[in-house]
Amino acid sequence: MSNDQDGMGGADPQDQLNDLRMSEKALPLLNHVKQFIRDTVDPMHEEWLTLGEGHEDRWTYAPGQLEILQTAKDKAKEEGLWNFFLPDSETGEGLSNLDYAFIAIELGKSPLASQVMNCSAPDTGNMEVLERVGTPEQKEKWLQPLLDGEIRSAYAMTEPDVATSDAKNVSTSAVLENGEWVINGEKHYISGAGDPRCKIMIMMVKTNDDGERGRNHSQILVPMDTPGVEVVGPMHVFGDDHAPAGHMHIRLTDVRVPESNILLGEGRGFEISQLRLGPGRIHHCMRTIGKAEVALDYMVKRGNSRTAFGQPLSKLGGNLEKISRARIEIESMRLLVLKAAKAMDVLGNKEARIWVSMAKAAVPEKACKIIDQAIQIHGAYGMSQFTPLPDLYADVRHLRFADGPDEVHHMVVGRHELAQH
């Protein structure tokens, strides 16, 4: 017989995990976010794209782009639309994960909304780590500029020569010498490290070869301008270098940082990962639902605006059923993500990991399918630069690796299910 004490598999309908309503205090904030995106962010995004046309240096921003972005950020901050993701009311809005889920879904519909309101990955996860485990000095030097939206950051874990889907394989070494960590190794797909505003990396490194498994790794702050940090070049995603932010290949040769740059303590890298990955993963899922909504909107509009064989495309070749299934899948994803967020609020990040893994396994895969079908109904036009669909697809498809491959999340959920019997 299965065990339902954890709120899964036929749980008590009175269980608070099943109450997925947004709080009354946060509802006006959600409406404010929607209006701000419509009135400020979307028009600014059009101007941003226009300014970037023909800019020759892909690894810098075109003249005027950062200025209009900063204007929108200043306005967002003035209106209290800032740092939603942090549960601490002194540094963020003090929202629950559930309340933030509703807002993040809206942020996911607009390419620049998260950045304008200082809720972009990987900064969100990095800020949460620094807020929870950073020393006062680390917070002053790195957290405060991130909270203020003055700099960007990166998280460096993935490596080219080992399977870092099992993070215990991370081999980049950090050796303590005369009060400094000396770091050597290579990192792949370090998102955002190409952005000229990126000033700091949180890096997973191996600090011990002989310790207890799970206690050999640490996380260390590595400024981008440290001697020995070499940005080799961008790792492409389906042929796109995603300049100017990029997903960079980084080589570290005798990189020296102060001993005090370690986070939480030596051998505690996986403790930090648990702090970071729960919220970070669910934030991606929230935004991905917004992207699936955009794709469905494009699918319906295209289907209703084109006629073939005497009928609208929306009623040909099973397209009506595809539209129906897309809506059903989006609502299913939404409920799963909201429940994962509620589980984090009620159970804590560690105990909610099963719900988070379920969402992370399901949402990008289902959203990819919806975006793919939206591309299909557009014909070849759907693969062109004239819709956002190719970028949406590449973004969501890469999420199936970026926060751990699907197989790892299924392993977590499957093991948990086996343990209930």
Image (tube, rainbow, N blue to C red):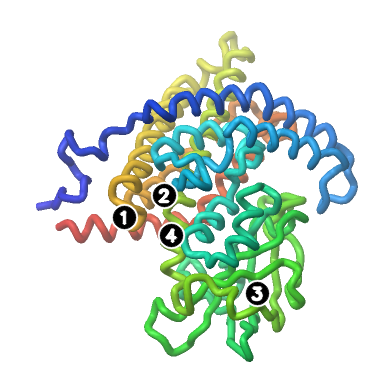
Q: Is residue 89 left or right of residue 246?
A: left
Tag in front: 3 or 2 = 3
Which tag, 3 or 2, sits closer to the chain's start?
3
The answer to whether marks 3 and 1 mark residues whose Cβ atoms lie closer than 8 Å is no
The answer to whether marks 1 and 2 mark residues whose Cβ atoms lie closer than 8 Å is yes
**Looking at numbered disc 3 in the image, what kind of residue is underneath it?**
Glu
Q: Nearer the viewer, residue 326 or 203?
A: 203
Q: Position of residue 281 (x, y in %)?
A: 47, 51
- Give the CA distance from mark 4 to mark 1: 19 Å
Residue denoted by label 3: 186
Q: Quadrant of the C terminus?
A: bottom left
**Looking at numbered disc 4 in the image, what kind of residue is underneath it?**
Leu
Q: Position of residue 23 (x, y in %)?
A: 37, 30
Q: Residue at x 56, y 44 (%)?
A: 396
Q: Please tell me whether mark 1 sits on a helix, a strand or a loop.
A: helix
Q: Position of residue 397 (x, y in %)?
A: 56, 47
Q: Residue at x 20, y 50 (%)?
A: 6
Q: Residue at x 48, y 87 (%)?
A: 209
Which tag, 4 or 3, sits closer to the chain's start?
3
**How dense is the environment of label 3, judged by Cα within 10 Å: few (below 14), some, or many (20 and up)?**
many
Q: Position of residue 139 (x, y in %)?
A: 58, 61
